[in-house]
Image (cartoon, rainbow, N blue to C red):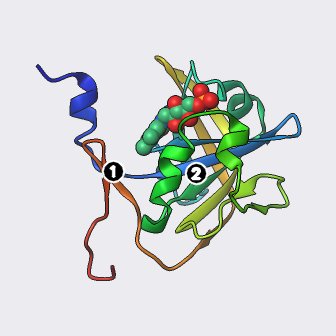
Amino acid sequence: MSSIKDAMSCFTTGVTIVTTHFESQDWAMTCNSFNTVSMDPALVLWSVAKVALSNRAFTKANGFLVNVLSLEQKNLAMKFSIGSQADRFRDEPIERMSSHRAKLPQSLAWFDCEIEQIVSAGDHDILIGHVLDFGVTPGVGLALSKRQFGYIETASA
Ligand SMILES: Cc1cc2nc3c(=O)[nH]c(=O)nc-3n(C[C@H](O)[C@H](O)[C@H](O)COP(=O)(O)O)c2cc1C
């Protein structure tokens, strides 16, 4: 018998680490619910579980920064999904943006966003962000399909 999670995991996604700065502390979590929404204005979204310890930080802070992970950052995906916030950032170099949010070097792309809207949806909150700044680095994206990490072979990869 397949679960709804099994079915949802068949949808191949990229993998991101979303950060925020709240009450003088860095917060981060691995997230594959990230998606693009609108080009003009530039809007993106992701959803954070209501039970996540970091939910309050992400929903009360005025913005978030999405790091789109490259294949080389595969180890960060698990590191930023478990343990304390201090353990997640331990030994990881970060770049501090003018928004105070943390950017991870070598991310394939990044989007620094202010919160545009929060939608309560079942057991998650959907955070829609207005992109204030962004950047791109050459590399290959980390992909997730059926709970396995990998990458998508493209002509440019
Ligand atoms: C590949 C991957 C993708 C994930 N995507 C999400 C997501 O989109 N939203 C979410 O709330 N949790 C997601 N998680 C789980 C969170 O990373 C994890 O529950 C969170 O870091 C727990 O920390 P916290 O309770 O301290 O906030 C994902 C985990 C992994 C490994």
Residue that appears at 52% across and 68% down: 108
Q: Quadrant of residue 127?
A: top right
Nearer to me, 13 or 129: 13
Quadrant of the frame with the N terminus: top left
Residue 45 versus residue 96 in the image, above or below:
above
Q: Amino acid at mark 2?
A: Leu
Q: How far apart are the alpha carbons under marks 1 and 2? A: 23 Å
Q: Residues within 10 Å of mark 1 (few under 14, many from 20)?
A: some
Task: Tell me the residue that label 1 is attached to.
Answer: 144
Horizontal relation, residue 150 to residue 105: left or right: left
Q: Is mark 1 within 8 Å of ligand 1?
A: yes
Task: Give percent across and percent down for residue 61.
Answer: 78, 35
Please tell me the numbered disc located at residue 123. none
Horizontal relation, residue 99 to residue 56: left or right: right
Please tell me the numbered disc located at residue 43. 2
SS at mark 1? Answer: strand
Residue at the extreme left of the image, as rendered:
1
Circle nearer the N terminus (1, 2): 2
Residue that appears at 33% across and 79% down: 157
